[in-house]
Image (cartoon, grey):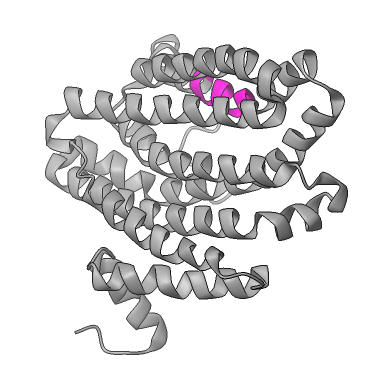
């Protein structure tokens, strides 16, 4: 109070015009965020109504792992969000460059996490839930692809947020929720936990495609370049081929797959130059 006295107003005041402008932006995004936060959990609730307790438990064990990992893309993207906001106001070409580079970085990171989940699903489920939850392993492998979709959609959703496309965000999120609920009812009843995992994956793919389409059509200068997905798929397939070798412990399999994944990406020149520069800097090597 002593330091800011005389520099800013001390007493609060209510300005209806300012509140109206703030709420116009905040409420649609808050609703979209709330829906995005609950629809994973909603799948568990719906599954508990239409499937057995065992199937619900198998899905919940996988969800416990995914719930932690879906926070990662949010942390990555929100670190760049202030840059997005400033660029959206002053320099659209800079915004396009930043969105594309972050999209590529998230695709690479999301691809690696998905690879680790697919190859190490057995080990992860045994640690998290115990050996009695072995049926959760294929569920986690399906939801691993969902994690990859969330990495991609996070970049596009925050790009739209920086452009104040709040209603578009809310619309796509509502469509994702509706698709998720409908497919969980259809597939969960017939296939249990695996069906619910496929339903969640399908809903996330629909949401990701929806965000990409909105971004491309409303802001053509920000149309994403998707070549990195081809490189990630090739690198992931090459690394996942190690699973064909029988008897490899999961941790060794993940470590070896990580090396192959990174090596293929380097060969394909799919890693953004900015990221390589930062890695060299951390190692103390010259940037050039």
| Residue at the (36%, 45%) spot, across then down | 82
Query: For residue 42, what is the image quadrant?
Result: top right
Count of numbered labels shown in the rendering: 0
Main SS of residues in magenta:
helix
The answer to whether residue 5 is seen in the rendering is no
Measuring 50% from the left and 15% from the top, which residue is drawn there?
Answer: 179
Is 65 situated above or below 240?
Answer: above
What percent of the width, then of the height, locates residue 216? 20, 29
Depth check: give the residue in front, 261 or 195.
Answer: 195
Give the magenta part as a residue range: 31-39
Q: Position of residue 127 (x, y in %)?
A: 80, 58
Q: Position of residue 286 (x, y in %)?
A: 26, 89
Image quarter where the C terminus lies is bottom left
In the picture shown, does residue 17 fall above or below 211? above
Q: Is residue 167 visible?
A: yes
Looking at the image, residue 231 sits to the left or right of residue 80; the answer is: left
In front here: 20 or 144? 144
The answer to whether 65 appears left or right of 159 in the picture is right
């Amino acid at each position: 109070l002593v330091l800011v006295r005389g520099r800013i107003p001390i007493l609060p005041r209510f300005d209806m015009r300012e509140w109206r402008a703030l709420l116009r932006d905040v409420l649609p995004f808050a609703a979209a965020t709330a829906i995005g936060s609950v629809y994973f959990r909603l799948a568990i609730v719906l599954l508990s109504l239409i499937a057995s307790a065992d199937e619900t438990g198998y899905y919940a064990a996988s969800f416990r792992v995914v719930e932690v990992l879906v926070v990662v893309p949010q942390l990555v993207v929100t670190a760049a969000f202030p840059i997005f906001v400033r660029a959206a106001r002053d320099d659209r070409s800079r915004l396009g460059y930043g969105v594309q580079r972050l999209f590529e970085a998230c695709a690479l990171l999301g691809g690696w996490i998905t690879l680790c989940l697919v190859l190490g699903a057995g080990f992860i489920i045994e640690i998290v839930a115990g050996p009695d939850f072995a049926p959760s392993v294929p569920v986690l492998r399906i939801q691993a692809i969902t994690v990859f979709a969330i990495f991609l959609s996070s970049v596009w959703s925050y790009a739209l947020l920086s452009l104040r496309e709040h209603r578009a965000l809310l619309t796509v999120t509502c469509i994702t929720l509706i698709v998720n609920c409908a497919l969980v009812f259809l597939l969960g009843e017939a296939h249990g936990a695996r069906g619910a995992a496929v339903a969640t994956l399908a809903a996330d793919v629909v949401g990701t495609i929806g965000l990409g389409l909105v971004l491309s059509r409303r802001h053509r200068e920000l149309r994403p370049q998707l070549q990195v997905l081809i490189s990630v798929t090739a690198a992931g397939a090459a690394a996942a081929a190690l699973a064909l070798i029988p008897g490899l412990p999961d941790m060794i399999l993940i470590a070896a797959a990580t090396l192959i994944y990174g090596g293929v990406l380097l060969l394909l020149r799919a890693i953004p130059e900015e990221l390589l520069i930062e890695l060299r800097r951390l190692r103390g090597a010259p940037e050039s």
